[in-house]
Image (tube, rainbow, N blue to C red):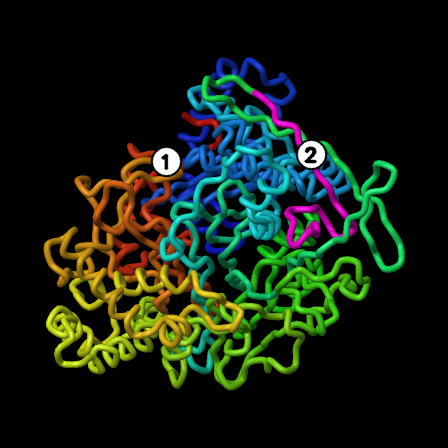
């Protein structure tokens, strides 16, 4: 079926039940292609049909694709096809965004986003990179493009928004996630201010700060000495936009066998596990993207930037950004853009141009992303990491040898630590330049710490293993720019002094309901109230609310009224203090508790109470009445409607320290909070003689509302009821909905 070595008896039982079906669907697929792909060359069509015969797709009873190919390239062909079946719109949109072509589908509003991408992504350069790539990598890229094109050829009813034919080199535009993620540090508003024309104003107004869910993830590794089974355990818990990744398994006769979360359109398991190891990525706080303030001079009609005692020519480039007009016709906007030796110029500040430097290693990044899925232990994983093409992720690692580890990003530029790289540095001073990359052992790292656990919640690495964490003073300042966060404090709380972890108790830890940010903030608010004079009109107005909060245990729950009141209060105060001057170096939590002042804190409680009374008739409302999960259609930007079905969600935004994250807020026309990001894929994995796992995905696997797997995991998602992962053939047996080859109707 989809394994090369394990339990061949079960494999043959499953395969034999499907053999006749596969034979029939092969003929039907050939006939369909003949009618559906009039623009496909004959040699292309023949190649697609041949490769499809080397691929088997098994859909389990959750709609999850288990793809097996004779070769790795066959597996890639099949998984690209399967992803397109589930949600071609998201596959295409990711590549429209990655290549700076979103405006071709979405119009002028995406123009600045496209320009930002085109400052780095050049099709001509990527085509050269593809041609120079190792032959094995080109074969995977070829198979990826063929799988998507075969899907389009056999599904003529699908109308791509802009990409009618995928080329292999396109895979390099979205090779690891770092390029897209790092580029997003560039402000669209400032980019438009620098390169735009008077009256453009195409960038949408910013939403309230409290509406933006902190990005990132949770990763926890448990060593054998503190697990009940004596095996290593791993929590995989990315926090992303909902429906941002597919869950699938891909295997081949060349040793590939990986399971986990795949970002739509990419051809590798991004966060997951294979038979021997597991890897979980969390967004890093390491400073790997820097801005350089350039001194620009104009001489004889040419632009120069000062570098030491010399003047160097500014690179001038012309970029065209196509976009779709409101009437459906196409137009083009021309830009003249600039770059220095540090990178593209993206804005201006205090009379100087700001150039940005970031990682741009698409070939190495794609190699690293693929090869780590085939690593078998810590040593082989670290050998892959030597490619140093991961700039955006910390990694939590565990394997069946019982080893657990923490890795900082591998792409970390070496810099002079006397400069503060959290702000633009002087580009005219050569001492601010990057001086190569750090060796892997020069960054914070951990391997098998004595405490038996490692965790990262997008916080600094200096609390990753409690007392056995790396020491802050041993590393340059730029190894971290975010510090601790409430989830980090929470993770330490649920992990320390435990000796008996199981998959079930690790799930319990991942969904622990404590909210450490409120455990700090609410006592300050209560003290503000207690300090009011007896005659103050706020005394009677807020008496009930304070009584409710005073006795709260700081735990979320569907029936919890204090959670609702605290979140409404916290969101209002968050937006108020987010506008404060941050030069003092205070975190937003410090500003709420220390700098906001008692009147602002109490007034925020008044506003929260008024909002609840206006929208729900009382300030005492169970959290589950407010906080909801709703999926009504397959749109990438979901609409929300209080009149349509939704289900309650007990956990909160991660900003309050909830390890389980649900980024929700009001939407136009709604009173309830509806979530769009946070926990998206959650898995717990146990490594031993045979790996076993449980998992859940937000909503369901399919992006099609009519599909039974569009929203079938929603209740499990909201309650933390992870289902069994069918990794091995004997686990999958009895849970198969369909077995087929690509191209089958």
Highlighted magenta segment, given as a residue range: 331-355
Q: Where residue 287 appears, x then y in whole percent?
A: 62, 64
Q: Residue at x 63, y 42 (%)?
A: 194
Q: Find residue 373 and report its image quarter.
A: bottom right
Can you identify the residue that label 2 sits on? 123
| Vertical comparison of 278 with 169: above or below | below
Q: Find residue 99 and report its image quarter.
A: top right
Can you identify the residue that label 1 sits on? 635
Magenta stretch prevailing secondary structure: strand
Q: Where residue 371 appears, x then y in whole percent?
A: 63, 54
Q: Residue at x 14, y 71 (%)?
A: 537
Please indicate, yes or no, whether residue 355 appears anywhere in the rendered image. no
Is residue 171 left or right of 363 when viewed as pictured? left
Q: Find residue 529 and report its image quarter.
A: bottom left
Instruction: Answer whether residue 68 is magenta in the image.
Output: no
| Vertical comparison of 185 with 328: above or below | below
Quick one: 536 or 162, which is closer to the camera?
536
- Helix, strand, or loop for circle 2? helix
Binning the other alpha carbons within 10 Å of mark 1 as few (below 14), some (14 to 19) or many (20 upward) gives few
Q: Where residue 689 appears, x then y in whole percent?
A: 48, 68
Instruction: Answer whether residue 351 is magenta in the image.
Output: yes
Binning the other alpha carbons within 10 Å of mark 2 as few (below 14), some (14 to 19) or many (20 upward) gives some
Q: Where residue 185 appears, x then y in whole percent?
A: 57, 52
Q: Residue at x 59, y 82 (%)?
A: 471
Quick one: 723 or 392, which is closer to the camera?
392
Please indicate, yes or no, whether residue 369 appears anywhere in the rendered image. yes
Q: Residue at x 81, y 47 (%)?
A: 297
Q: Which mark sits nearer the N-terminus, 2 or 1? A: 2
């Amino acid at each position: 079926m989809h394994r090369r070595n394990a339990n061949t008896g079960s494999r043959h039982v499953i395969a034999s039940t499907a053999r006749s079906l596969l034979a029939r669907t092969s003929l039907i697929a050939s006939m369909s292609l003949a009618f559906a792909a009039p623009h496909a060359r004959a040699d292309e069509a023949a190649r697609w049909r041949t490769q499809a015969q080397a691929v088997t797709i098994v859909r389990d009873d959750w709609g999850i694709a288990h793809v097996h190919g004779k070769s790795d390239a066959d597996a890639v062909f099949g998984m690209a096809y399967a992803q397109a079946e589930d949600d071609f719109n998201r596959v295409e949109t990711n590549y429209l965004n990655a290549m700076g072509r979103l405006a071709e589908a979405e119009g002028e509003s995406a123009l600045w986003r496209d320009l930002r991408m085109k400052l780095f992504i050049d099709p001509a350069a990527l085509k050269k990179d593809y041609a120079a790539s190792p032959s094995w990598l080109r074969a995977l890229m070829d198979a990826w493009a063929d799988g998507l094109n075969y899907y389009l050829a056999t599904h003529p009813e699908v109308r791509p928004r802009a990409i009618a034919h995928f080329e292999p080199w396109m895979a390099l535009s979205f090779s690891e996630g770092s390029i897209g993620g790092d580029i997003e540090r560039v402000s669209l508003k400032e980019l438009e201010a620098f390169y735009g024309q008077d009256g453009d104003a195409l960038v949408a107004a910013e939403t309230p700060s409290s509406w933006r869910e902190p990005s990132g993830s949770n990763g926890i590794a448990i060593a054998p000495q503190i697990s009940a089974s004596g095996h290593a355990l791993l929590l995989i818990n990315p926090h992303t936009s909902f429906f941002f990744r597919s869950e699938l398994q891909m295997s081949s006769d060349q040793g590939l066998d990986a399971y986990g979360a795949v970002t739509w359109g990419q051809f590798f398991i991004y966060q997951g596990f294979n038979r021997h190891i597991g890897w979980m990525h969390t967004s890093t706080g390491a400073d790997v993207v820097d801005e350089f303030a350039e001194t620009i001079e104009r001489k004889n009609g040419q632009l120069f930037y000062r570098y030491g005692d010399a003047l160097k020519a500014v690179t001038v480039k012309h970029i065209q950004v196509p976009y779709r007009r409101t009437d459906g016709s196409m137009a083009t906007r021309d830009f003249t853009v600039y770059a220095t030796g540090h990178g593209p110029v993206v804005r201006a500040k205090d009379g100087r141009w700001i150039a940005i430097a970031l990682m741009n290693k698409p070939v190495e990044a794609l190699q690293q992303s693929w090869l780590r899925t085939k690593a078998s232990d810590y040593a082989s994983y670290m050998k892959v990491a030597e490619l140093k093409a991961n700039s955006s992720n910390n990694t939590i690692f565990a394997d069946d040898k019982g080893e657990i580890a923490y890795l900082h990003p591998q792409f970390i530029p070496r810099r002079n630590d006397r400069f503060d790289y959290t702000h633009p540095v002087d580009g005219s001073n050569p001492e601010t330049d990057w001086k190569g990359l750090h060796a892997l052992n020069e960054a914070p790292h951990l391997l098998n710490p004595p405490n038996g656990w490692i965790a990262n919640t997008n916080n600094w690495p200096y609390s990753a293993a409690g007392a056995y964490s790396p020491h802050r003073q041993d590393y340059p300042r730029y190894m971290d720019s975010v510090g601790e966060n409430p989830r980090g404090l929470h993770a330490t709380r649920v992990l320390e002094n435990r000796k008996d972890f199981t998959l079930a108790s690790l799930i319990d830890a991942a969904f622990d309901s404590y909210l450490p940010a409120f455990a700090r903030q609410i006592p300050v608010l209560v003290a503000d109230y207690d300090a009011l004079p007896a005659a103050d009109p706020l005394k009677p107005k807020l008496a009930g609310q304070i009584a409710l909060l005073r006795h709260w245990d700081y735990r979320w729950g569907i029936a919890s009224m204090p959670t609702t009141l605290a979140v409404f209060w916290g969101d209002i105060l968050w937006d108020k203090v987010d506008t404060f001057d941050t030069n003092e170096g205070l975190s937003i939590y410090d500003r709420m508790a220390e700098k906001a002042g008692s009147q602002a804190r109490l007034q925020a409680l008044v506003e929260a109470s008024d909002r609840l009374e206006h929208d729900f008739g009382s300030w005492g409302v169970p959290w589950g009445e407010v906080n909801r999960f709703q999926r009504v259609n397959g749109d990438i930007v979901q609409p929300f409607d209080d009149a349509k079905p939704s289900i309650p969600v007990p956990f909160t935004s991660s900003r309050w320290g909830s390890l389980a994250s649900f980024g929700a807020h009001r939407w136009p026309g709604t009173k309830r909070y509806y979530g769009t990001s946070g926990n998206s894929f959650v898995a717990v994995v146990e490594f031993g003689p045979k790996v076993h796992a449980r998992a859940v995905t937000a909503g369901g696997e399919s992006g099609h509302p009519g599909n039974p797997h569009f929203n079938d995991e929603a209740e499990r998602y909201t309650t933390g009821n992870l289902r069994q992962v069918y990794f091995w053939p004997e686990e999958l047996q009895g849970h198969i909905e369909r077995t087929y080859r690509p191209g089958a109707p």
